[in-house]
């Protein structure tokens, strides 16, 4: 027996973690409903590898936010958001 904690106490599959990692971006941006937020929080509490990736995403987002003092024009922001949603739909359909 080892005394080291297991990174996945619930034996989560890579696919389950991939799903949570996809939702982390929305979680960081407060774009999930409360039920989804609770699920993501619970997963992060039990999955150290995903928690590390969450911390990295949050740090990168924070650094980028501090580095960018200009706001993109509304039209550009809308086009980028639309394209991101299109890509997300393509990924989910695969």
Image (spheres, rainbow, N blue to C red):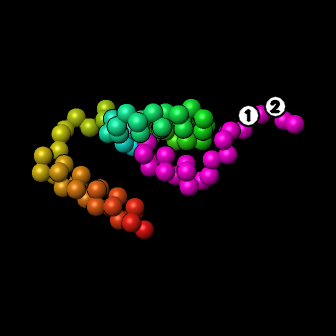
Could you say where residue 33 lies in the image, as x and y percent from the top left? 34, 37
Q: Which residue is mark 2?
A: 3
Q: Residue at x 39, y 66 (%)?
A: 93
User: Is 14 on the left or on the right of 3, as rendered?
Assistant: left
Q: Which quadrant holds the C terminus?
A: bottom left
In terms of secondary structure, where does tag 1 sit? loop
Could you say where residue 26 lies in the image, as x and y percent from the top left? 36, 42
Counting other residues with Cα less than 10 Å from the Cα at mark 2, is it few (<14), some (14-19), or many (20 or more)? few
In terms of secondary structure, where does tag 2 sit? loop
Asked whether the viewer can see residue 54, the reply is: yes
Kindly give the residue lying farthest to the right in the view shown.
Answer: 1
User: Is 85 on the left or on the right of 93, as rendered?
Assistant: left
Kindly give the residue lying farthest to the bottom in the view shown.
Answer: 94
- Image quadrant in which you'd find residue 27: top left
Question: 56 or 12, which lies in front?
Answer: 12
Counting other residues with Cα less than 10 Å from the Cα at mark 1, is it few (<14), some (14-19), or many (20 or more)? few
Q: Residue at x 35, y 39 (%)?
A: 32
Q: Residue at x 12, y 51 (%)?
A: 75
Q: Which residue is mark 1?
A: 5
Q: Is residue 50 above or below residue 79?
A: above
Residue bounds of the magenta highlight: 1-24
Q: Which quadrant holds the N terminus?
A: top right
């Amino acid at each position: 027996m080892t005394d080291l904690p297991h990174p996945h106490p619930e034996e989560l599959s890579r696919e389950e973690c991939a799903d949570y990692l996809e939702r982390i971006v929305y979680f960081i941006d407060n774009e999930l409903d409360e039920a989804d937020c609770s699920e993501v929080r619970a997963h992060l509490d039990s999955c150290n590898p995903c928690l590390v990736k969450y911390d990295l995403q949050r740090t990168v987002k924070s650094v980028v936010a501090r580095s960018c003092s200009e706001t993109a024009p509304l039209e550009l922001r809308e086009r980028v958001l639309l394209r991101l949603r299109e890509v997300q739909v393509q990924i989910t359909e695969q």
